[in-house]
Amino acid sequence: MRGIRLRGAATTVPPTLRLAWLAILLLVGIGPATAASTAGCHNGENFGRWLESVKQEAAGLGVSRATLAEALDGVTFDPSIVARDHHQGVFQQSFLEFSDRMVARYRLETGAQMLRRYADLFARIEHQYGVPGPVIVAFWGLESDFGTNMGKLPILRALATLAYDCRRPEFFRPQLIDALRVAERGDLPPSEMLGDWAGELGHTQFTPSDYFRYAVDYDGDGRRDLIHSVPDAMASTANFLVNLGWRRGEPWTQEVRVPADLAWQEADLAIQHPRSQWAHWGVTSSDGRPLPADNLPASLLLPMGRFGPAFLAYPNFQAYLKWNSALVYSTTAAYFANRLAGAPPVSRATRPIARLDGHQLLELQQLLVHQGIKVGDLDGKLGLTTRAAIKEAQLKLGLPADSYPTPELLEKLRVQR
């Protein structure tokens, strides 16, 4: 789920996308149309010839002929995988919509059960890596429902399809190569490499490259098995988070109350102040108690603007963003961990919050560009770059700069068009 897809989201394919599938099928055939249409990303090779080049590259990295044959012989292009990659929209939900759905009662109850069942394992992992059990278990629950939904698709076929497709070959080709290296190392045979359509696998859905680099053998059987071994999967998750910058003994997020007269432009993940400074400005814990007056750096995170829930995001939250850059997912994963660690349910919005849909967000992005403000991709999604652009526009227009898109901001930008 790290910046690629969300497991379990319903996917509907419009007629225009079904036509695209037919076009893709034509592209993988042999003939002049193939060379003319695909020269931009794989030099016009059809899928079979292109796959031979992958085998040669993997062989140069030490993957044996036997592994290559077992993994790739007979692999074919799957247009349905490309269709899924082009049609994702689940992260359009607001934080409360997404967290209400993903941090459901059954996940909280099951997560608590897992923490009890594997208490000794998580104690050992925290002692070695410094990552608390609730943090790991929250990812476990969100990524695979605690191992019950790890995916059943052959990831080698999915990765080969996505690596051949022209959308993101620079990401997926190395993933395919590293999946072959995982097989060569003896961690998983190709026949057992079953996972998600985007090539992720295991209890916490590692990409093959992260699997190759950060998986650890924690049960001592000589293999790094993130599908069948809970100890391997949990310890590997901790090891990965440490490599993403996790800091031992520090919090990740904390729900807070924010005064109505706060200087809203300070609410920005790119801005950090000591916790004592937030306390000086009137920010308190969610139950109204004062914050510790210490120097622990923190950013103020307002996932739904100044009228929604508020969190102090500590340096460990950056590991969440590196796990998955979608803010709604990262905030939800951190909140889930807090709940498993004993925190109460998040506060609701203090007033109704109007949310722009994807079409309105795309229009907002276009209007921001018209104002000379960089928004990143024009994709109708509320990413961190778009939030920063919104803040810049709010400051120019004299609006509360909480980085959240509102109908009022959209209308003001329309007037200035």
Image (spheres, rainbow, N blue to C red):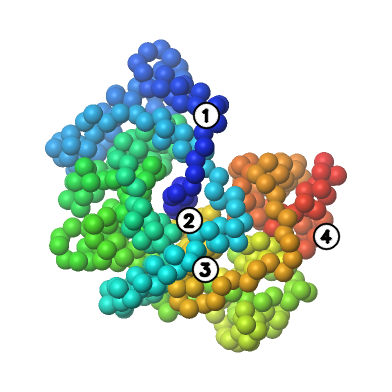
> Badge 2, how many Cα within 10 Å: few under 14, some, many 20+?
some
Question: Distance between the Cα atoms at labels 1 and 3?
Answer: 36 Å
Which numbered disc, 1 or 3, marks the residue that appears first in the sequence? 1
Q: Which residue is mark 1?
A: 17
User: Mark 3 falls on what kind of element?
Assistant: helix
The residue located at (59%, 74%) in the rendering is 255
Query: Where, quadrant-wise, is the C terminus in this rendering?
Result: top right
Outermost residue to the right: 415
Q: Which residue is mark 3?
A: 335
In the image, 258 versus 370, the foreground residue is 258
Instruction: Return the mark for residue 398.
Output: 4
Which numbered disc, 4 or 2, marks the residue that appears first in the sequence? 2
Residue 80 is situated, as x and y percent measured from the top left of the image, at 42, 32
Residue type, numbered disc 1: Leu
Disc 4 versus disc 2: nearer the observer: 2
Which numbered disc, 4 or 1, marks the residue that appears first in the sequence? 1
> Badge 1, how many Cα within 10 Å: few under 14, some, many 20+?
some
Residue 389 is situated, as x and y percent measured from the top left of the image, at 69, 52
Residue type, numbered disc 3: Tyr
Question: Distance between the Cα atoms at labels 3 and 2?
Answer: 14 Å
Q: Are marks 2 and 1 in contact (CB under 8 Å)?
A: no
User: Mark 2 falls on what kind of element?
Assistant: loop
Residue type, numbered disc 4: Gly
Which numbered disc, 3 or 2, marks the residue that appears first in the sequence? 2
Q: Which residue is mark 2?
A: 324
Q: Quadrant of residue 364?
A: top right
Disc 3 versus disc 4: nearer the observer: 3
